Amino acid sequence: MRAVLEPIRKPHPASAWLRKPCAAFLCIAVATAAAASSALLTICSLKLGARSRFSDRLLLALVCLMGWTASAQAQTQVTPLRYGIGFNIVLSGQEGLGLGFVGRASYPINADLSFAGELGFSGFVLDGRDDAAYALQPQAMAIVTLPFTNERAPYLITGVGGFIVTNTNDDSISGPTIHLGLGWVRPLTDTTLFYEINPALVLGDSAVGVAIPFRVGFIF
């Protein structure tokens, strides 16, 4: 997926020496996020009960995916991984409006298609800390670049993942998710700006919910 994984314009030569340190920093950041997520899920396991089994399995799959991406980055020089980080604004039918961050690593298959893994975190804190809820949103996805004629390139996102809420309100829904979204990328000087909407259908134990993430960030 050339449009999303690489800036549409040729990067500035001065950015070449930044790639490896930046990639290493992002790998460390994603690994730290995974460790923090594991600790958070452990703390919440007593409250989540049976749902914690799904959460643990989903986190294990995410850790394996991050290990694969790190291995791919070490083995390939022709098509390196691309990394993205941005703001994650989530509208949930049960929890309301959540604010947080998202990190993503993507691997190009060809000029039109790439595979990616991401981890999002959102805090639903607008009702105060006492009633706050927090959600982890891991996802594995395929990204398809659509035809474009200018410097703003559209792309489709589809994949599966999870929506893991830490509170135990009766209205809360946690479970696997199915995603289908649309985004755009626009080149800057040394990075690429992306913005997207990626609605998800949340398959709970006894009900189905909807979560709609809006993301704005940068690809390195």
Image (cartoon, rainbow, N blue to C red):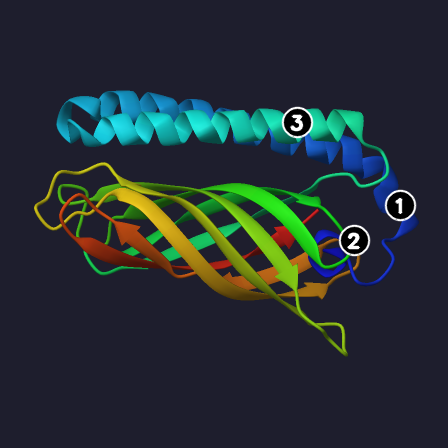
Instruction: Work out whether residue 13 or residue 170 is closer to the camera in this orientation and state it.
Output: 170
Mark number displayed over residue 14: 1
The residue lying at 18 percent from left, 48 percent from top is: 128
* Tag in front: 3 or 1: 3
Work out whether mark 2 precedes mark 3 in sequence or the reverse, and give the earlier one.
3
Q: Secondary structure at mark 3?
A: helix
* Tag in front: 2 or 3: 3
Mark number displayed over residue 61: none
Q: Are marks 1 and 2 in contact (CB under 8 Å)?
A: yes
- State the count of labels: 3
The residue lying at 38 percent from left, 32 percent from top is: 58
In this view, the residue farthest toward the right is: 13
Q: Which residue is mark 2?
A: 190
Mark number displayed over residue 70: 3
Cα gap from disc 3 to disc 1, whole angstroms: 24 Å
Q: Position of residue 109 (x, y in %)?
A: 73, 47
Q: Amino acid at mark 1?
A: Ala
Position of 200 with respect to 208 (left or right) is right
Q: Amino acid at mark 3?
A: Ala
Indicate the quadrant where residue 7 lies.
bottom right
